[in-house]
Amino acid sequence: MYALVEILGKQYKAVEGQTVRVDYISQKEEGSSLEYETVLAIVDEDNAKFGTPYVADAKVKATLQGSLKGDKIRVYKKKRRKGYTRTQGHRQKYSLISIDQIIA
């Protein structure tokens, strides 16, 4: 059984016991529990429930495991024959959450 959950404006596939990498959650401490009621769909082996837009009385309970940083991305700009070059870097932060329970 899995659920499609909207977390911080993005959709993720949540399976019980699995760890999911989501965008950075800033106001919570490591080990704190999270609860999401924005469940878009619940799919079981033989049936599926889809919400309009969310499934009624459905929740996903998770635990915040920690945070990590993604790979460094380099942005390079250049205009030929003008002497203009610019390099900029970015490193995205992510949070790891483990899915504890899916309540349908």
Image: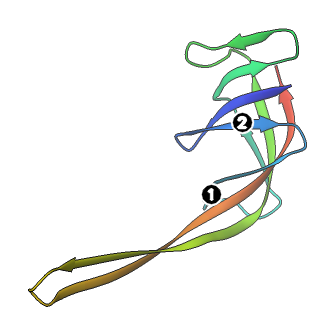
- Closest to the observer: 77 or 26? 77
Closer to viewer: mark 1 or mark 2: 2
- In the depicted view, which residue is nearer to us: 10 or 88? 88
Nearer to the camera, 81 or 43? 81
Q: Secondary structure at mark 2?
A: strand
100 up-or-down from 42: above or below:
below
Nearest to N terminus: mark 1 or mark 2: 2
Q: Residue at x 60, y 62 (%)?
A: 26
Q: Is residue 31 left or right of residue 73?
A: right
> Do the numbered discs 1 and 2 sit on residues whose CB atoms are within 8 Å?
no
Q: Residue at x 84, y 30 (%)?
A: 102
Residue 47: x percent and y percent? 82, 9
Left or right? Give the position of 91 relative to 25. Answer: left
Three-letter amino acid code of the residue under disc 2: Lys
**Which sits in the foreground, 61 or 11?**
11
**In which quadrant of the rendered image does the C terminus lie?**
top right
What residue did someone put label 1 on? 25
Quarter-of-image position of residue 75:
bottom left
Residue 104, relative to residue 3: is it above or below? Answer: above
**Which mark, by number, is residue 5?**
none
Q: Which residue is mark 2?
A: 13
Query: As shown in the figure, which amino acid type bears the numbered disc 1?
Result: Ile
The quarter of the rendered structure image containing the N terminus is: top right
